[in-house]
Amino acid sequence: MQPLSELTKALHCPKADGHDAHSPPLWMTSAYDFDSAEQASDRFNNISPGNVYSRFTNPSVNDFERRLAIMEAAETAVATASGMAAYLALAMALLRQGDHLLLGAGMFGSTTHLFRQYFGQFGVDCETVSITNTGLWAQAIRPETRMLILETPGNPTMEVADIRALANLAETHGILLVVDNTILSPVCQQPLKHGAHLVVQSAGKFIDGQGRCVGGAIAGAEPLIAPIRMVLRSAGMCMSPFNAWMLAASLETLNARMRLHEANARLIAQWLARHRAVDSVYYTGLPNRPDESLISRQQSGHGALLSFDLKGGQAAAWSFINALGLVSRCTNIGDARTMVTHPWSTTHCRYSPAEKSAAGIGPGLVRLSVGLEEPADIMADLDQALHHARRRERITA
């Protein structure tokens, strides 16, 4: 029999604790009974495996972690309360006072703010670097650099980093490469196969797929995940059993959903590229990109996220967004419904204007998370809103 793919392995992953329910049950409990005082002591002291307390051991959470680890081609994974909680646990476990880390420019504003502001208070120095220039990363590394963190493709500019080149750089300097894989999910990209040490997921995005909950996860080798798991044991930024149960079930349909998201997004990106109200469209599935060969090497798909520049700047972008009828004005991504946001004034508002511009985020940039609707319906709504924005631009000119 030929080896199974990661997707199939995750679908047929044995249920937690070997229970025989065809669909994994929801384990809603805070604590567990022990057979004896000796068993309780052995579990608390990590002498024998088993459930201890749901803050750090729960069958529903464990089921989600094991399925995600398989899909990310990882040895193991740990789930957290949110994507931001994943970064918090990662930093608490693996960074120390005096450490330096490099962040990909243009990352989600809260991620950069967490490292700059809050970990900066505790003596961790953070610097941002363009994700497309590996040479700049090499120049920015110091003796005290401990970690490189980036997301690729970048959100919202859809710039692509060379994971393998950055992994080689990290290996040379004995530091960790952490890749946020939220935008593409393990269906369209597996960064660990290209040399990344850890992969971060904001699981309430495409993994959930319906905007029902928040959650996060970190996948990688056991020696790196173990200290993160111990942080959760003490600090408690754990995933709830209910969210884990929903997310584990969502993993079963992730492949099908991502393929439909991509088919819709590709049609819409091509249509937008021809629209006279649009200056530029950013999507890794469009042809003739200068990084096309890199994309084909490390991505197996292109996902649902795209962005485009509107003629007329912020006024045109806001006019367009306000005129939409079907598309939701929502700063999330990865929902079954198409969503739009204005990164300059929302998700990346904590960056200075110079930083936003340097990262390719202008006041006329609009981000679209393409959903599962009929693409013709999405395009009809986009078209009427674009015409509205153009009319407003002509009136105010």
Image (cartoon, helix red, strand yellow):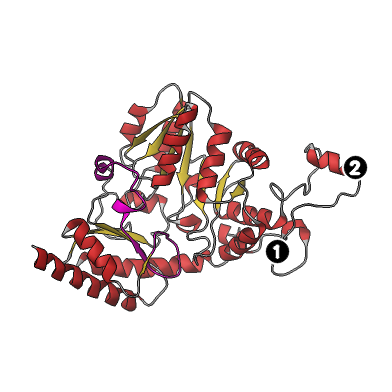
Q: Residue furthest left?
A: 397
Name the residue located 53 percent from the left edge and 41 percent from the top edge.
88
Q: Position of residue 325 (x, y in %)?
A: 32, 75
Closer-to-camera residue (260/275): 275
Can residue 276 be seen from the camera position used here? Answer: no
Task: Say which residue label 1 marks.
Answer: 26
Q: Which residues are magenta?
A: 330-358
State yes or no: residue 83 in magenta. no
Query: Which secondary structure, mark 1?
Result: loop
Decide if residue 47 is in sight here. yes
Check the picture and name the quadrant holding the C terminus.
bottom left
Of callouts 2 and 1, which one flags the residue occurring earlier in the amino acid sequence? 1
Along the viewing direction, whichever of 203 and 255 lies nearer the viewer: 203
Amino acid tagged 2? Ala
- Compared with 348, 143 (above or below) is above
**Placement of the N terminus among the 4 image quadrants:** bottom right
Percent across and percent down for residue 334 are 44, 62
Identified at 20% across, 60% down, the residue is: 315
Residue 373, relative to residue 17: is it above or below?
below
> Left of 96 or right of it: where is 382?
left
Mark 1 surroundings within 10 Å by alpha-carbon count, few (fewer than 14), some (14 through 19), many (20 or more):
some
Please state the horizontal and vertical placement of residue 65, each as a whole percent of the image: 63, 52
Residue placed most toward the observer, 391 or 92: 391
Circle 1: residue type? Leu
x, y percentage for residue 219?
A: 56, 46
Q: Splitting the image into 4 quarters, where does residue 117 fall?
A: top left
- Lateral position of residue 267 relative to residue 397, left or right: right
Q: Secondary structure at mark 2?
A: helix
Name the residue rendered at 41%, 41% in the picture. 112
Q: Is residue 395 left or right of residue 235?
A: left
Q: Which mark is residue 37?
A: 2
Q: How many marks?
A: 2
